[in-house]
Image (cartoon, rainbow, N blue to C red):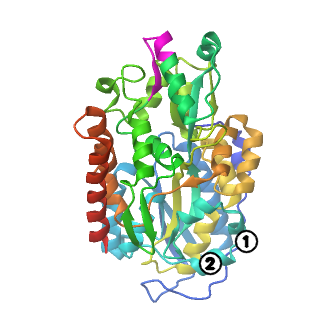
Amino acid sequence: MKLSAPLAALLTLVVATACAPQTSSNSASDRDDKSGTLRVWLFQEVGNEPKKKIVDTVVSAFEKAHEDTEVDVEYIPVETRAQRVKAAFNDPKSAPDVIEYGNTDTAGYVHDGGLLDITEDFGTWGEAKNTDPTARQSVTVDGKVYGAPFYVGVRALYYRTDLFKDLGLEPPRSLAELATTARAIRAARPDLYGLVVGGAYTYGAMPFIWANGGDLATGKGGSYASAIDSAAARKGIKAYTSLFTGANCPAEKCAGMGGNDTVTAFAAGKAGMAIGGDFSHAAVEAGKVKGKYAVVPLPGATPGSIAPAFAGGNNIGVLKSTTHRTLAVDLMERLASKKTQSALFDAMGFLPTFTDVREQAAAREPFVKPFVRTLAAGTKFVPASAAWSQIDSSLVLPTMFQEVISGKKSVDAAAESAAAKMNDAFGSAG
């Protein structure tokens, strides 16, 4: 989702976040230089200019506040971040001081010894008290904080208002009603998917597991065991995979779809409903359904409830190898501050991680309200384990869904196989 903001607002943005007092140093370097050049890696967006303008304003304020300092910002492709960050961890001389990173990467980066423990700094940062709990969880490993949440993204239910009106349908209030409504749409309009779903759409499937009382894993402190084969999780898997039929979204068409594919299908007018993020708004607005859709929270298992959504998003952290610890923490806080997040919402549509800033954003842009309601109802996160990146990149969950959808395995057998793979990964992560 990208929302335009007046240029004047960007040019007059003033970021004034006080530097938290440093009470200890746990960086790998024994230096804490108070001048010099700080290197920053941020993610390159599809339309990066609005983000760059906001960051330039933050950097300008930072350089004015600290004499003899300069900030060198490099925008790196998200797709190549793993290789770049791994190289930075292995070669401190070429590493940045401050980085933007995906919130599912936190545990892995901590395990690799790359991120600085900023627990005390975060605790004395005045704005941190308004950070929502799930966002804070995304920067926390074993009770210690390794960054500042930058923005959050969640998914909700997009639906065609014109189609619902023509067919006399109401937005579903439970997952059971969601399935019934999807079949009703497909029956009346066989040229459309009822609810477009994807066998490779992990984060669209997870709410079905969580809403039915299941979970991905159990444990804490870096020690986890898979829970994907529990009775509750299997109930959620069955609920999701049952949608891949000719009565809704045929397996031969939908089994290989990912999240972007489902949003694209909905935007093109090929589906009555889709599970999409706040970040999907721009794509939908640019499609054939513009002006003919609305969004509500994805319903839960009981009527009137909201299914827990995955809280995605990015964080800002300081590398453990920095030789500018105090300055780097200050710059991190400025980049992740309330004023910066508010400006990024107006310019890019990134949902703020501060609850008060998010409520203000929703008041300015009504479209955001169902996503804010979803966040307020309670979100979920992936296990805080270094193993998650391996589980994710190995497509353990998509493989499980596709095995069921294709009929190769029963829900029980597929879940048992996925659990074994997850436990192998958890075990190897130590």
Identified by mark 1, the residue type is Gly
Residue 297 location, quadrant: top right
Q: Of 72 and 205, which appears nearest the observer?
A: 205
Is the residue marked by circle 1 packed among few (<14), some (14-19), or many (20+) residues within 10 Å? few
Which residue is under mark 1? 126
Question: What secondary structure is marked by label 1?
Answer: helix
Seen at 74% across and 49% down, the residue is 359
Give the extent of the magenta segment.
Answer: 185-196
Q: Identify whether 49 is placed above or below 151.
A: above
Answer whether residue 195 is magenta in the image. Answer: yes
Q: Which mark is residue 363?
A: none
| Quadrant into which the C terminus falls | bottom left
Is 46 left, or right, of 10 in this rendering?
Answer: left
Seen at 71% across and 63% down, the residue is 130
Q: Of 67 and 192, which appears nearest the observer?
A: 192
Q: Identify whether 65 is placed above or below 183.
A: below
Identified by mark 2, the residue type is Asp
Is the residue marked by circle 2 packed among few (<14), some (14-19), or many (20+) residues within 10 Å? many
Q: Mark 2 touching mark 1, by CB under 8 A? A: no
Is 372 left, or right, of 75 in this rendering?
Answer: right
Residue 84 location, quadrant: bottom left
Q: Is residue 33 visible?
A: yes
Is 44 left, or right, of 349 in this rendering?
Answer: left
Residue 205 location, quadrant: top left
| Residue 238 in picture, x, y percent from top left | 40, 39
Q: Of 417 and 55, which appears nearest the observer?
A: 417
Answer whether residue 260 is magenta in the image. Answer: no
| Residue 176 in picture, x, y percent from top left | 54, 32
Q: Is residue 13 visible?
A: no
Seen at 30% across and 63% down, the residue is 423
Q: Which mark is residue 121?
A: 2
